[in-house]
Amino acid sequence: MDVALTQLPNAVAKVSVTIEPQDVHQAMDRAFKSMVGRYNIPGFRRGKAPRKIFERYVGRDILFKEAAQQLVDNYYLAALKQAEVEPVSEPRIKVVSMDEDQPFQFDIEVESKPHVEIGPLDEFLTEPLEVQEVTEEDLNRELEAVAKSQAQLVPVEDEPVSMGDHVVLNLKGYLADNEEEDGETAEPFVDDDEYAVEVGSGMAVEGLETQLIGLKLREPQTVQLTYPENHPAVDLQGKSVRFEITVTDIKRPDVPPVDDELAKTLGYESEQELRETIEARLKDRKAQEALRDRLANILGKLKARASFTLPPVLVDRAIQNQLQELNNMLRQMEVSIDSYLESRRMSLDQLREDMRPQAEERVKEELILEAVARDQNITVTDEEVTDSIASMAAVYGQPVEQMMQILRSNRDVETLRNALLIAKASEHLASTVVPAVQQG
């Protein structure tokens, strides 16, 4: 088998394959033997007609077609491997020439992963891994957040609303466009006797929470504001509104002190143990941040160095993954994708195009990380794949074999293996520090 590789635009590889006449002749014999029993030839029992008689009655072209399919099936993967082509889409097969006494030629055109040249890595791996120290300020800030998470809400009677308060409002909202000249108003678009909001949470319409600060219990107030242009309710975007507000309830978080009692509430023996645990957690977080920063820095330099064409099909898959992630997030917020698109005044196709630059960066990084794995001899064993599947099965409460069958039926095992490979390459880039060569 002879193989010739030609690179076409859009990351399409054209692999031209030539098979020796002897192999063609054998394929024609196999084709005849597999097909002769399917036809009734006059004067012969089914399957017993000689080949020449079969060709006279049925035609030689049908044998050529069957033999060509067999040859393509038999040599397709070997041809791609010999040409060092890794397909990422369904191939287009074209038979160039087929004759029993001549070489069989066919072409494979398929989108493929580019061969990424990353060059030497040591110059990037000499960069130090800089982990920030945990300061006393960092520790105290984290302890304060822990204490706030255990706060109890207590009623407030004699003090105005302040940042962090949980308030209940009697709230009526009117659109300025509906205000009439004689002073009468249309029906309010908001009319809620128990509108609850945490001041400073950012959950209410932009601008409302800050105007609540300073309001007193049971004293009616009027608040004016303009809805933002990107508000989810399209009919309110950019509209001026008037809110009539009466604060009917104020509760303020009573934050406990950081002491032994708080620590015991959280399951620790003492405040000291709580502090040590939080400090260890902060150190781990800062170590992870340092690894992410170093990886991003090295990847940025590798992307600037490497030049290759991105396969469109991989970019489209990355966009689809981003859409799925967005859908999952919106589902948790009980928002449909249609409502999201309506709020942004865009179509699904426009959203896809907005996602394209990020998808392209993601694909480029993954291809570079695969090249790093190849360069550094990083591999993923079958045992590591099985362990990962076992972890997934535990999360979903399913037997490992059942999870394995699901992944195999969806052809996702190799996808998982590649994800593990990329993770290992990322860890290698982020954590491997090579000593700088001393000059002189």
Image: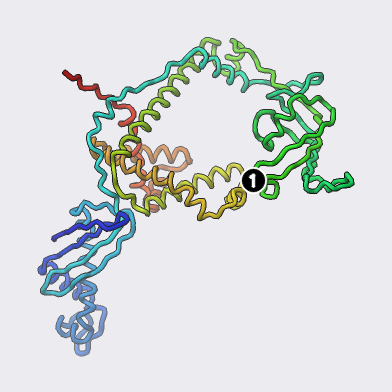
Residue ID for mark 1: 232
Where's residue 389, x and y in %? 39, 41
Counting every numbered tag in the picture gives 1
Residue sitting at 69 percent across and 34 percent down? Answer: 207
- Seen in the image, is 416 located left or right of residue 108? right
Where's residue 439, x and y in %? 18, 20
Residue sitting at 11 percent across and 66 percent down? Answer: 20
Q: In this view of the protein, which residue sits in the foreground, 435 or 182?
A: 182
- Seen in the image, is 250 located left or right of residue 290? right
- Seen in the image, is 140 located left or right of residue 33? right
10 Å crowding of disc 1: few (<14), some (14-19), many (20+):
some
Image quarter in which the C terminus is found: top left
Where's residue 37, x and y in %? 23, 78
Residue sitting at 65 percent across and 15 percent down? Answer: 256
Q: Residue furthest bottom?
A: 43
Where's residue 423, x and y in %? 35, 36
Does 131 appear above or below 124? above
Q: In this view of the protein, which residue sits in the foreground, 284 or 315?
A: 315
| Amino acid type of the residue tagged 1 in the rendering | Pro
Q: In this view of the protein, which residue sits in the foreground, 15 or 150?
A: 15
Q: In this view of the protein, which residue sits in the foreground, 259 or 4?
A: 4
Does 56 appear above or below 19? below
Colour scheme: rainbow
Q: Residue furthest front?
A: 181
- Seen in the image, is 159 located left or right of residue 202? right
Q: Secondary structure at mark 1?
A: loop
Residue 223 picture quarter: top right
Residue sitting at 60 percent across and 17 percent down? Answer: 265
Does 191 appear above or below 112? above
Image quarter in which the N terminus is found: bottom left
